[in-house]
Amino acid sequence: MKKLVIFNLQTDPSSPVLGAAIDWIEAFQSHFEVTDVVSTHVGTNVSLKNTKILEIGGGNLSARFIAIARLLKFALHLIRNRRDYVVFHHMSPRTAVFPGILFKVFGIPQGLWYSHSSRPLTLKISSHLVDWIFSSEENSLPIINSKAHFLGHGIPLKKFNNFQSMKRRESAVLFLGRLSRIKKLRNLIEEIALLENRIPITLIGPQSDKIYLEELLELASKLKINLTIRDSVSHDQVNSIMNQFKYFYSGMEESVDKSALEAAISGCLVLTTDIGTQELSGMNNIWSKFANIENPAIHEQIQILDGLNTEELQSMQEMVQSDAIKKNDLKKTILKISSIMKVGK
């Protein structure tokens, strides 16, 4: 199988949330003769060599009908050449249902990458249609399935090679991602309020829930915590921003935020109580080797780390970065996925 088709949600390097899809496409290109992409939305500045990109669109009812028609037309093309292709759905269980059901009927092999806490109906259905399911770790796949492979995440290391030592970083906490309630940002403020030294917080990301942000600002003011909220940035700016902070917060439970792993690779110490995130970011080794404590609360994590000198923090930083790189290198993750899909096991 020398030809790959990737179905994804967005192909746009400027996207603050889904910009990394470009890196996944480029990584797959070295393993397949042809790598084509079918994307719900495509940005205006997309440049991918030797890759055809089909934008199916979506939105209102008429746009959805057009998208279905485009998917059906593309699916029929694939079915006619089915012996040449393998299909990969990147965080897109919806396309694994349709046109995935057609690919299943006509024997076109399919893989699905899914790493999130939500459990949509499309995920349950698509799990019966695809041949392989890939995820970062067990807690990030909210279904139990014998087809599952847990491979670590896929972080493009070339974008996170700017590395500042702890001496040059601000003793503050960064969160970068969707500023939504599921990220438990209120919990971060409340945890820092338990500290004698209430370090500053910076939140950066898309701001769709204005009421929630007002609640956070009001709570921070009440608890006398310096809270800064900034709008989203492009994916190319993430590394330089992360290099300014000692700490990165991840409030997700039973799901690994990719940004937390990017932060670990950038040299931040990740504050989290999620076991999977601790494992993939390398922070589990910090608590077992340096603190001899299992899964401390967020304020306890900060107390322990703030009590260390710069040399000790530097040692931890290097350990975390090394572990996160080993477990989440995009090239290695794509190699594993490609090998599994080519061999068929």
Image: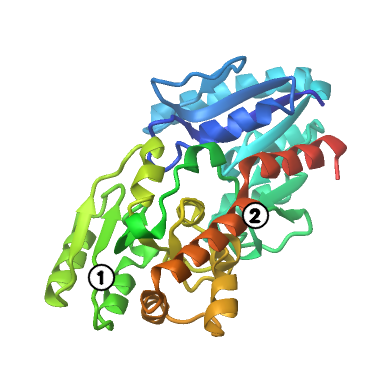
Instruction: Residue under label 1, please give it.
Output: 199
Determine the residue positioned at 57% across, 62% down: 319
Tell me which label, 1 or 2, sits earlier in the chain: 1
User: Along the horizontal axis of the image, is 46 left or right of 191?
Assistant: right
Q: Quadrant of the C terminus?
A: top right
User: Along the horizontal axis of the image, is 216 left or right of 56?
Assistant: left
Percent x, y for residue 52?
Answer: 59, 16
Between 7 and 235, the one nearer to me in the picture: 235
User: Along the horizontal axis of the image, is 334 left or right of 212?
Assistant: right
Determine the residue positioned at 59% across, 25% down: 37
Extreme residue toward the top, this view:
50
Between 104 and 279, the one nearer to me in the picture: 279
Between 299 and 2, the one nearer to me in the picture: 299
Percent x, y for residue 337?
Answer: 73, 42
Circles 1 and 2 in contact, beta carbons < 8 Å: no
Measure the C-alpha gap from mark 1 to mark 2: 30 Å
Q: Is residue 271 visible?
A: no
User: Along the horizontal axis of the image, is 120 left or right of 302?
Assistant: right
Looking at the rendered structure, the kind of residue marked 2 is Lys
- The quarter of the picture where residue 287 lies is bottom right
Q: Quadrant of the N terminus?
A: top right
Q: Secondary structure at mark 2?
A: helix
Percent x, y for residue 170?
Answer: 29, 60
Determine the residue positioned at 40% across, 20% down: 45
Instruction: Residue under label 2, please give it.
Output: 327
- Residue 252, numbered label: none
The answer to whether 169 is drawn above or below residue 61 in the figure is below
Between 248 and 43, the one nearer to me in the picture: 248
